[in-house]
Image (cartoon, rainbow, N blue to C red):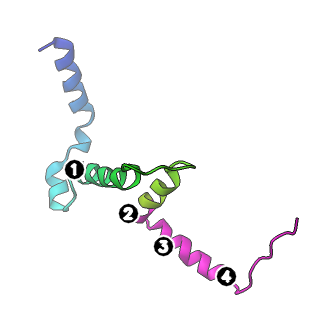
Amino acid sequence: MDFAYGTSRRGYLHNNRHRMRYDEYRRRGLPITTALMESTIKRMNRRIKGTEKFWREGAEPMLQLAADKISETEPLETYWKNKAETQNGTRKSRAKA
């Protein structure tokens, strides 16, 4: 093993040891692997970027909606709740050209 490589690994572990409390994470039921996130990303990519799918404006809006749907902060729920509270039953008229 190269001395610099071993030194950099030890340095990384030393500098990040406060993030590596896996026993605590397990007790709290938290995931200690990225497998769940990687699986979600692969699933989203297959659905959005699959074969025979073409996006005129790009897939970014769809990716944002998919991310919002699985987000713990539930931004879509908040959006629709706020939108419902501001509706007054009247339709905005379009400006005539």
**In this figure, which residue is indicated by the disc labeled 3?**
77
Whether residue 57 sits left or right of residue 45 in the image: it is right
Quarter assignment of residue 82: bottom right
- The structure residue drawn at horizontal position 21% and vertical position 14%, both measured from the top left corner, is 4
Q: Is residue 63 magenta?
A: no
| 3D distance between C-alphas at marks 3 and 2 | 11 Å
Of the two numbered discs 2 and 1 on the same chain, state the one appearing first in sequence: 1
Total marks placed: 4
Of the two numbered discs 3 and 2 on the same chain, state the one appearing first in sequence: 2
Where the N terminus falls, by quadrant?
A: top left
Quarter assignment of residue 86: bottom right
**In this figure, which residue is indicated by the disc labeled 2?**
70
- Element carrying mark 4: loop
| 3D distance between C-alphas at marks 4 and 2 | 26 Å
**In this figure, which residue is indicated by the disc labeled 4?**
87
- The structure residue drawn at horizontal position 74% and vertical position 81%, both measured from the top left corner, is 91
Residue 84 in the image: x percent, y percent? 60, 81
Q: Which range is magenta? A: 68-97
Q: Counting other residues with Cα less than 10 Å from the Cα at mark 1, is it few (<14), some (14-19), or many (20 or more)?
A: few
- The structure residue drawn at horizontal position 53% and vertical position 48%, both measured from the top left corner, is 58
Give the residue type that dot 2 points to. Answer: Ile
Q: Counting other residues with Cα less than 10 Å from the Cα at mark 3, is it few (<14), some (14-19), or many (20 or more)?
A: few
Residue nearer the viewer, 76 or 58:
58
Does the CB distance between marks 1 and 4 fall below 8 Å?
no
